[in-house]
Image: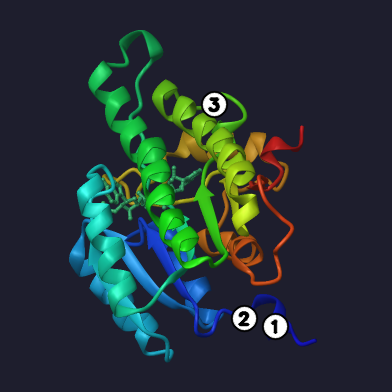
Amino acid sequence: MDLDEIFGLRGRVAVVVGASSGLGVECARALASAGADVALLARRKERLEALAEELGASGVRARAVMADATDDASLQLAIDEVEAELGGIWALVNSAGISRLSRALKHTREKWDQVLAVNLTAAFVMSQQVARKMVARGEPGRIVHVSSVLGRGASPVHPQVGYAAAKGGVDNLTRQLAIEWAPHGITVNAIAPGYFPTELTVDPSVGEMDADFVESIRRLTPMGRAGEPAEIQSALLYLTAPRSTYVTGSVIPVDGGWTAW
Ligand SMILES: NC(=O)c1ccc[n+]([C@@H]2O[C@H](COP(=O)([O-])OP(=O)(O)OC[C@H]3O[C@@H](n4cnc5c(N)ncnc54)[C@H](OP(=O)(O)O)[C@@H]3O)[C@@H](O)[C@H]2O)c1
């Protein structure tokens, strides 16, 4: 058996929601490097088109598809478009996410709703819509949620009760969907990143993560540093691999050891 039989994705279609920035971009690059045709979903079209061009140059088919993860109809349209253009979806990666910092006593209902809608509800709706297609075709598939270390523990660094609640929900959504869809050969897993410099964590006025934040990461992470966004790629390829047929319901930390103690 060669490596390609285990990890290769040539001829398979993958969808990344949240592919216009950060970890979603690195997930899309990883899938394309394994040979997958990739559909890139998010709201910022130019970003998606630039990435589609980059990936297309490596010989895979890549499509930019605008979609708002909080709008069920928009997601359904996007899935239909992807399947019509590229074919049946093999792997779905839910990487869209937002965070709204504020102490729990002051966290508004509006912020709560926004965070839950993108981080948790959209992951469910997208998974359900894609899984319905897989089941109707009688084909197996892979679903990967990008959760967070805050799915299993609270943040000692930032007050973000909505985000922590949403990611806790994502972890258990992963387990419930894994159980229900295992008979169809659809595996459902999550990656739980620690801290990575992306638009989510970088202070736009400085162009990097806040110095106190970096110091907290250094102190609380056994590896003594934040992650590099591309460090998410190997876990993703493991979870989307054709041979990962017996891995489901797991939440894999990619966190430099943040959750090891
Ligand atoms: N960075 C970290 O340290 C870290 C740590 C743990 C977990 N995570 C998780 O990793 C995932 C990716 O985050 P990131 O760090 O890569 O953040 P990011 O750079 O801010 O990217 C977030 C992505 O989500 C998309 N998105 C947000 N709202 C959306 C909406 N309504 N519809 C469609 N797409 C939407 C954004 O695209 P548009 O704005 O173009 O729509 C963007 O592509 C998130 O789930 C996040 O919670 C990140």
Sequence-earlier tag: 3 or 1: 1
Residue situated in front as seen by the camera: 8 or 148 = 8
Residue at (66% x, 65% y) in the render:
238
Amino acid type assigned to the residue bearing label 1 in the image:
Glu
Write down the quadrant of residue 39 in the picture: bottom left
Q: For this view, does 81 lie left or right of residue 159?
A: left
Amino acid type assigned to the residue bearing label 2 in the image:
Gly
Give residue 155's mark: 3
Query: Does the residue at mark 3 contact the one at mark 2 (Cβ under 8 Å)?
Result: no
Query: Does the residue at mark 1 contact the one at mark 2 (Cβ under 8 Å)?
Result: yes
Q: Is residue 208 visible?
A: no
Give residue 5's mark: 1
- Residue 136 in percent (x, y) is at 44, 61
Residue, far top: 105
Residue identifier under label 2? 8
Amino acid type assigned to the residue bearing label 3 in the image:
Ser
Disc 3: CA contacts within 10 A as few (<14), some (14-19) or many (>=20):
some
Q: For this view, does 78 lie left or right of residue 233?
A: left
Give residue 138's mark: none
Q: Report helix, strand or loop for mark 3.
A: loop
**How far apart in space, not on screen, are marks 3 and 1 (Cα)?**
40 Å
Residue, far right: 1
Q: Report helix, strand or loop for mark 1.
A: helix
